[in-house]
Image: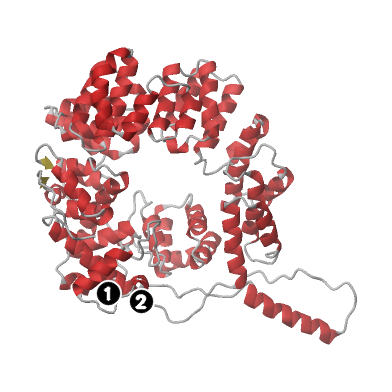
Amino acid sequence: MNRNFAFMPKHPIKHFLLLAILVLCLGAWESGFAKKPNVSKSSPGQPAPYELTEADKLFIELRDAARRNDVPKTQQLSAQLSNYPDTDYVRYFRIKPQMFDKGNEARADSSVDEEVGAFLKTYEGTAIGDRMRNDWLLVLGKRKDWAQFDQEYPKFVLDDDTNVKCYALHSRLVKQEDAKRVGQDTLKIMVDPRQFGLACQELVPALVQANGLSNSQARALGRAAAEMNFETAGRRIGGEDPIASIVRSARADSSKTYRDFLQTSLRYNKEDQAMAWGVIGQFLAKRLDRNAYDAYRRQQQLGFNSLLSAETQEWKVRTALRAHDWQLVRESIESMNPVVRQRDPAWTYWYGRSLKELGDPEKANAQFQLLEDQFSFYGQLAREELGKPIVIPPKVKVSDGEIKEMGKRPGFTRAERFYAMNLRFEGNREWNWELRGMSDRQLLAAAEYAKRIHLYDRTVNTADRTKGEHDFALRYPTPFKDQLSPIAKNIDLNLAWAYGLIRQESRFITNASSSVGASGLMQVMPNTAKYVAKKIGMNSYTNERLKETQTNLTLGSHYLNMVLKDLDDSWVLASAAYNAGPSRPKSWRERLNQSTEGAIFVESIPFNETRTYVKNVLANASYYSLLMDGQTTPMKQRLGVIAPKTAVLSELP
């Protein structure tokens, strides 16, 4: 802790007066700025609670004001925190709001150039320094100050901002670099429309003018934004789209749009017909409408596959899977944008499966071999396709000395302080920055250190990064086992599955809370908690108790068991129900045309979050089973076959 004082006497004073002032200041500093964590007794497996000081509260208020870009408030609060230990963050939170407007767009007229320059020089090589450089690059790009942008951009370590990348591409274009090459690189980064900020919106028209992108390619990028309801961004990127009204209509009512376009499609040229059928297919598929297959077949016959959005391409494969049309699965994956195809192992696996189903097992196995060493849902399925069991790699043990060294790392020390203050965003930034460049052994030592200080989410996150040396007890930890095991045993709930779910739900953060109100280790909703408490006779329950670890585990476990029984003991359906509600998987099952393998059912879950959730929960459960029992049920067997069944309403919330 920094114990420097901000005052110096200008004139001689009596010794006892100086001493008195020092004592008073020290007391104020201890109580206001450097109070240590409250060391009162904590629950098993949890860190001691941290009592926020008044200065901590001001710091959190400053952080929130900076997020709102509230300049007057940040100026006022930062002035009150001149002696706060985290000086760099105080400075950052004071400067950053002056660089952005209330809509969080960079301001070309920002007047903090000297302050930013001094900050970057002082905090070069730090997490918050890199964050400032990210912000500064957005300002420089907005100004079109390409000379200074080009000086700063190579120093941006994380380089994880799509808009900064778009400005970097624009700078290359201005410097007369080959426009076609810049256009190709633009298509590689402009995949997710949620990241298409003003920088990307300005870049695409400039590329069209320079013949770096065709009008069709620009319209395709704009259409991808419009599909996600970013219509203004879509028009800025691609101009007026001839099928804009069809995109809008398909978003609102895909079934009606499908029927209408059957009558009007010939009014459009072939490219626009193909694009319209693709968009209609996407929105029908997300509603599991059987006409999605017909829409996509029509698009496939017309062609222009490369102009389909990432969402449309992915749902085309899912629709073909549900129809068991392996030829369309193969062709759809082959025509995918390579970036879209490579970012998700699903498409490597299903491409292999399509080759296998179409009678080419040798090429199929080559695809499965690309995944067999991945510790994921599709990695497990690929191993089974190759006739190999799911296994846990040998455990690599690190020494106490290596672990203790991690406790001396400043990034971890800073992160631990932020976590104690419940500033997880800042904590994660500092922790992850410290992990850069670590060897596998160092990562394992850091993961073990996180476990010892009860930061289980960092334990998992850090251990997950190892490439060749592993410790799966750190990737799949079992904190709170003394509390969870008796609960699971009492209701005959599979403990490995329960742990797989908690790992996905909260990463073992006891005070985790979601934007919709779920809380605790098992992310239980208040209404669900009340329902379960009544059913199991927990008469003393109040919503305040949901924050208690024992109560949260009890109610969450019972609810998981309830949805399992309600959904015919299917882990696939019950996992989906825990995330999306019990009525939805019943509806999804009802809409099946025929019995289908569980993996196809999972891949075609309409909600992105739930689809990813189910995959991860089931993959987690396999490894927890191996760690706990030394064996696990094959993934294909666990997934089973999902048959169509009329949905029956349940009283479960």
Q: Nearer the viewer, residue 579 or 432?
A: 579
Q: Position of residue 350 (x, y in %)?
A: 21, 35
Lower sequence index among marks 2 and 1:
2
Indicate the amino acid at tag 2: Pro
Q: Which mark is residue 483?
A: 1
Q: The residue tagged with tag 2: helix, strand or loop?
A: loop
Q: The residue tagged with tag 1: helix, strand or loop?
A: helix
Cα–Cα gap, marks 2 and 1: 9 Å
* Disc 2: which residue: 44
Q: Position of residue 92 (x, y in %)?
A: 63, 53
Q: Position of residue 228 (x, y in %)?
A: 39, 35
Q: How was this image coloured?
A: secondary structure
Indicate the amino acid at tag 1: Gln
Q: Residue at x 71, y 43 (%)?
A: 113
Q: Residue at x 63, y 66 (%)?
A: 85
Q: Residue at x 20, y 65 (%)?
A: 495
Taking 129 as reference, is 444 above or below it? below
Determine contact: label 2, label 1, CB under 8 Å: yes
| Quarter occupied by residue 74 | bottom right
